[in-house]
Amino acid sequence: MLVAAAIARGRGWLTEQDERLHAQLLAKSGAPRGLPCSVPLDAVMARVRLDNKRGRICLGAGLYPFVLLRHLGQPAMSQGQPLVGVSEEEIRLAYEKLQSGYYAALTF
């Protein structure tokens, strides 16, 4: 969820406040906002490549289907589905943000 929020913010769809709200909601629900241990990006990408959203929309090589918000409560749509193609570079940047402890360090 936080990786998706970071990607949407990187695209200019969500504001910093919207992204922080994702982390705040997770904190209030008791869900973790960080990783318990370092997981290599290669391992994450191996899982992303097997995600059950594959095949729901047609994507070019190197793109992966993600649910991203254009605004809070409004998913981005493509091909009639609430999914959009995301590049591995976008995933890497957002994952590095999560892995850095950025969200876990936020206070509310």
Image (tube, rainbow, N blue to C red):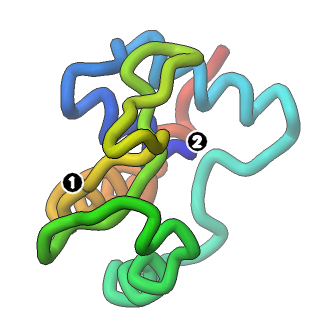
Mark number for residue 33? none
Could you tell me which residue is drawn at 38 percent across and 34 percent down?
77
Kind of residue indicated by mark 1: Glu
Q: Nearer the viewer, mark 2 or mark 1?
A: 1
Residue 68 found in image quarter: top left
Residue 85 found in image quarter: bottom left
Local packing at callout 1 (Cα closer than 10 Å; few below 14, some 14-19, many 20+) is some
From the viewer's perspective, tell me whether residue 93 is left or right of residue 57.
left
Instruction: Give the number of callouts.
Output: 2
**Image coords of residue 26 (percent x, y):** 73, 35
Q: Is residue 103 above or below residue 9?
A: below
User: Whole-Å distance between the Cαs marked 2 and 1?
Assistant: 20 Å
Residue under pointer 2: 104
**Image coords of residue 102 (percent x, y):** 44, 41
Quadrant of the rendering where the N terminus is positioned:
top right
**Image coords of residue 51 (percent x, y):** 52, 76
